[in-house]
């Protein structure tokens, strides 16, 4: 739902498959994007794995990137246009839980 005057955007992308080294993969995801700085580990939520968040500064403001990696998925949630004072870590875990479900 878009509200007039609200310029916040959330982008979600991910892939599934077999991930043999989640920690190394998470490090590689951020290392491949040198514009993302201040990367910190964050709790991945109830689905496990590893997760981290970092940020990138542009002329349009701060963009926050949160990524999770587990044995079967890699996903990234990008927050654009959120105030710097907002903490997107909880929202990241909620979004991940909505998009990823354990196989039966």
Image: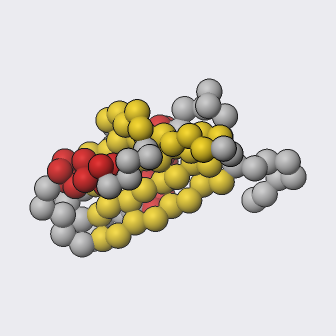
Q: In this view, does 67 lie to the left or right of 103?
A: right
Residue 14, quarter of picture: bottom left
Q: Is residue 22 left or right of residue 93?
A: left
Q: Where is residue 80 in the image (x, y as percent from the top left)?
A: 62, 49
Q: Position of residue 71 (x, y in %)?
A: 20, 60
Q: Is residue 5 left or right of residue 104?
A: right
> Is residue 87 among the parts visible in the rendering?
yes
Instruction: State the residue lying farthest toward the top.
Output: 85
Q: Where is residue 40 in the image (x, y as percent from the top left)?
A: 35, 33
On the rendered image, what quadrant is the C terminus found in?
A: bottom left
Q: Residue at x 52, y 52 (%)?
A: 78
Q: Residue at x 75, y 50 (%)?
A: 7
Establish if 41 lies above or below 66. above
> Is residue 97 among the parts visible in the rendering?
no
Establish if 67 lies above or below 55. below
Of residues 37 and 48, the one drawn nearer to the viewer in this rendering: 37
Establish if 27 lies above or below 104. above
Q: Which residue is drawn at 32% across and 61% down?
A: 74
Q: Residue at x 75, y 59 (%)?
A: 1
Instruction: State the residue lying farthest toward the right.
Output: 4
Looking at the rendered structure, the number of numbered marks drawn on it comes to 0
Which color scheme did the rendering employ for the protein?
secondary structure
Q: Where is residue 99 in the image (x, y as percent from the top left)?
A: 45, 62
């Amino acid at each position: 739902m878009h509200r007039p005057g609200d310029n916040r955007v959330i982008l979600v992308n991910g892939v599934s498959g077999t991930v043999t080294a989640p920690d190394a993969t998470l490090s590689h995801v951020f290392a491949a994007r040198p514009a993302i700085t201040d990367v910190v580990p964050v709790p991945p939520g109830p689905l496990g794995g590893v997760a981290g968040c970092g940020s990138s500064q542009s002329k349009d403001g701060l963009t926050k990137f949160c990524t999770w990696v587990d044995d079967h998925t890699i996903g990234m949630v990008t927050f654009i246009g959120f105030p710097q004072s907002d903490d997107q870590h909880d929202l990241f875990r909620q979004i991940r839980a909505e998009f990823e479900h354990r196989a039966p």
